[in-house]
Amino acid sequence: MIKDDFSEPVFENASPLNAMAALRGILSEEEELAFMNLLFSSSASIRGANFGLSRKEVEKQLKIQNDNDAFFSFLTRVNQAVSRYFQVIYDERRDQVVVMMRVPARAARNTLSKESLALLLYMFYQQEVLQHEFSLFGQLLEALGHETKKANQRIQLSLDQLKKIGAIEEYEDTHSDHKAYQLTAIGVHMFSDSFLRRTAEFSQSNKLNKEEVLKFFKRYNLYQEGDAE
């Protein structure tokens, strides 16, 4: 799976290539094999929309069981070593572990159309900032497609593109006849801090620091329960 690379790495690492070459000194044989299998299973061409491995499968390969410390230690050590090029994420809702690859901005733009990128960013704002559980198709159509010819068809094609790369999934329990979509962990992690900062700066027409942008995107749960939206 891919991730835009407008960004600084998740973990500081001055020599990522050396760290990757030295993975055998950081990981046990079982952990190294598990990471290799995660890389393989996270490929869209190999797994289709079913990216990554379940936590149960990863734990089986690591020869651990119900050991949170060992599981998250593995994720942390891998990310510390390869964060310049990869990020291993754990999707709790799907109980799935996925490897995302950082790519240059040009390659990221070639992966998603402008319409798909706009839809993904809009859903990110709705669900990560406003804390909506899902986004209704009608909301997406009203926000981004009401002045576009064949809007229904074009938005559906863009949504299908996002589903294909595992960024969103259909949300079933809406108690409504309307289609709804929910971000996956892949979709949430596709935007780097740098990209979000630049997006907010462009919309506000002034330079913002990282803390202001992260606050805006509610990354640190700054709003207390009961606060007005």
Image (spheres, grey):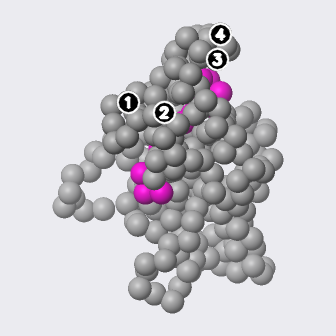
Q: Mark 4 points at which residue?
A: 18
Gap between marks 3 and 2 measured at Cα: 19 Å
Residue drawn at the location 46% of the way across and 28% of the way down:
74
* Amino acid type for the residue under numbered disc 2: Leu
Mark whose residue sits in front, 3 or 2: 2
* Amino acid type for the residue under numbered disc 4: Asn
Quadrant of the frame with the C terminus: bottom left
Q: Do the residues labelled 3 and 4 touch (CB within 8 Å)?
A: yes
Q: Within the magenta stretch, is there residue 87?
A: yes
Mark closest to the chain's N terminus, 4 or 1: 4
Where does the image place residue 91, in percent across and percent down from the top left? 47, 49
Residue drawn at the location 59% of the way across and 15% of the way down:
24
To which quarter of the image does residue 36 belong? top right
* Amino acid type for the residue under numbered disc 3: Met
Residue farthest to the bottom, as pictured: 177
Tell me if residue 139 can be seen: no
Q: Mark 3 points at which residue?
A: 20
Residue drawn at the location 30% of the way across and 46% of the way down:
221
Mark whose residue sits in front, 1 or 2: 2
Gap between marks 3 and 4 measured at Cα: 5 Å
Q: Is residue 67 above or below residue 218?
A: above
Q: Which mark is residue 62?
A: 2
Residue stretch rendered in magenta on the structure: 82-94
* Amino acid type for the residue under numbered disc 1: Ala
Left or right: 119 in relation to 225: right
Mark closest to the chain's N terminus, 3 or 1: 3
Gap between marks 3 and 1 measured at Cα: 20 Å
Q: Within the magenta stretch, is there residue 16?
A: no
Mark closest to the chain's N terminus, 2 or 4: 4
Mark 3, other Cα within 10 Å: few <14 / some 14–19 / many ≥20:
some
